[in-house]
DNA sequence: TCACTAAGTGCTCATTCTACACTAATTAAT
DNA sequence: ATTAATTAGTGTAGAATGAGCACTTAGTGA
């Protein structure tokens, strides 16, 4: 056992990076945003969006910066979930990476920037092999997302501002990877009392048209202490 | 927006540390193990057990090493839960710290080592002010522990190998910080089918004596896929 | 006006949760 | 030996929640 050192100078310093798992959702299902690396190592391979932490920023800031850099997106809800630190996870140099996930609305996404960086949406089920330990990160992020789904109304971030119950249902089905009963789902969502039904219908998905809903942030914030659990 | 750099050499390196939140439990309730720092800065103040990551070890290994260093304990279940990275969290030098929590059995603890390092158990409710952001880490760890309590039989690590139902109940009450109904608790625990009732009584707590139980790791492992949720 | 499509809506039964109080076993004191 | 004291141990009923299931309605296009 080594003696604990009592001064900072003799300690090892390491590279710290952040990697961002960006989930999106559209009619085709749950997707993830990947980039084709434009630098070595593994140039040309698919990878998560990542970047190194700078001396003068927090990890949260770094994650926000990286996301913004690749997508132009701002003010996105991101959550840190794990630090990956296996010694040889990056073959070039020892790098510890802190992974974040974010949920974004595919429609809001800046297509220009994605194009510039050769980023591309992939269906979760058709995701390619990624570099390093990025596949592992994605599966951990999915697990975390599933859990979050049942304790916070996290899913609304993945939809347009106005959405139908069907869209919400399909989002939950995609995240939880199981079929849900339409009637039970709607009554459970309604019992949370965080949606507003609009006097407006979406006529694209059916002849009858289906009512649009909005997430009511005020109502949600008002009950934040309640810490709901949604059992789907 | 800065250009993403495509070589590792020009990136900032930082100090990375681990901090360990060690929970213990005895007749008096839930406790936490703290040390009096024997080096600057903040020498003499109370703090979590921590140490710097070395170039050739993973964070998990570092956490295990640090815990072992301060307590002599080995083979302890530790869980990483968050990376703290505010720029000025450590006044001496930029340090990112990854926090872990562990649950240990106070009786098994090596009193010698604690003494050597001036470590001391504190009741959660009487914890002193800690250095840096350590108080925040502790409250996050408590929150995580509460959550874990309802999805994994995490509590058993805090008890002696053989324990009474009352002890288990009091442990859960301490972790969840609320009163639980004895009968409901016992039937819920029994329905998990992960305890073995021994033909042995603990005569210390009452005249009648109460049966001792053991955690049955085999049964638990066998149902690991079931992923229970314990609603207390 | 008919055919088609997705929207919208309740009920029943099963399961789980919650609240609640008495008896049993043993020891210590007299 | 009897009594007092203490904690262990045990069941039920009513409430709430969860799960499974099918028909009617509205609107459009042919």
Image: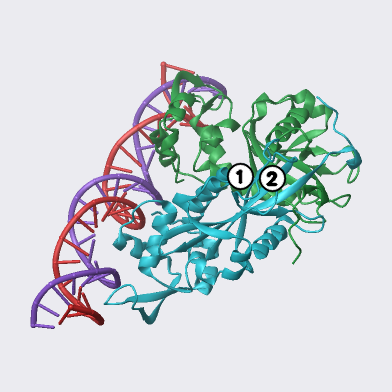
Chain colours: A cyan, B green, C purple, D red
Q: Quadrant of the N terminus of chain A?
A: top right
Residue underneath mark 1: A131
Could you tell me if the residues under marks 2 and 1 are in contact, i.e. CB atoms within 8 Å?
yes
In the image, taking residue B113 as reference, residue A213 lies left or right, namely left
Q: Quadrant of residue B115?
A: top right
A70 or D1: which is nearer to us? Answer: A70
B38 or B163: which is nearer to us? Answer: B38
Q: Which residue is drawn at 91% across and 41% down?
A: A9
Q: Is mark 1 on a helix, strand or loop?
A: loop
Q: Quadrant of residue B199?
A: top left
Sequence-wise, the earlier of marks 2 and 1 is: 2
Which residue is the extreme one toward the front?
A44
Q: What element carries label 2?
A: loop
Label 2 to label 1, Cα distance in Å? Answer: 9 Å
Q: How far from the left and from the top, in percent, is residue B32?
A: 70, 39
**In this rendering, does residue B15 appear at all?**
yes
Q: Which chain carries label 2?
A: A
Q: Which of marks 2 and 1 is in front?
A: 2
Q: Mark 1 lies on which chain?
A: A
Reply above or below: A194 against B155: below
B46 or B124: which is nearer to us? Answer: B46
Label 2 crowding class (10 Å Cα cut-off): few <14, some 14-19, many 20+? some
Residue underneath mark 2: A41
Q: How far from the left and from the top, in percent, is residue B100?
A: 68, 41
**In this rendering, does residue B216 appear at all?**
no
Q: How far from the left and from the top, in percent, is residue B198?
A: 45, 20
In the image, taking residue D17 as reference, residue B45 lies left or right, namely right
Question: So how many labels did they put on this image?
Answer: 2
Q: How far from the left and from the top, in percent, is residue A112?
A: 60, 70
Label 1 crowding class (10 Å Cα cut-off): few <14, some 14-19, many 20+? some
């Amino acid at each position: 056992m080594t003696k604990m050192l009592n001064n900072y100078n003799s300690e090892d310093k390491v590279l710290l990076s952040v990697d961002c798992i960006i989930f999106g959702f559209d009619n085709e299902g749950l997707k993830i945003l990947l980039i084709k690396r434009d630098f070595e190592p593994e140039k040309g391979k698919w990878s998560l969006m990542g970047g190194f932490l700078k001396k003068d920023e927090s990890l949260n800031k770094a994650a926000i910066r990286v996301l913004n850099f690749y997508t132009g997106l701002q003010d996105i809800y991101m959550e840190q979930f794990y630090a990956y630190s296996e010694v040889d996870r990056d073959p070039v140099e020892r790098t510890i990476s802190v992974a974040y996930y974010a949920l974004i609305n595919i429609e809001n996404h800046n297509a220009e920037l994605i194009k510039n960086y050769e980023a591309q949406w992939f269906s979760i089920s058709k995701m390619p092999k990624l570099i390093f330990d990025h596949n592992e990160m994605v599966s951990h992020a999915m697990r975390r997302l599933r859990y979050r789904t049942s304790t916070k109304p996290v899913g609304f971030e993945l939809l347009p501002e106005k959405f139908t119950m069907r869209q919400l249902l399909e989002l939950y089905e995609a995240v939880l990877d199981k079929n849900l009963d339409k009637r039970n789902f709607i009554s459970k969502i309604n019992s949370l009392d965080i949606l507003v039904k609009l006097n407006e219908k979406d006529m694209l998905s059916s002849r009858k048209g289906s009512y649009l809903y909005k997430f009511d942030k005020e109502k949600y914030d008002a009950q934040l202490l309640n810490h709901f659990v949604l059992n789907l």
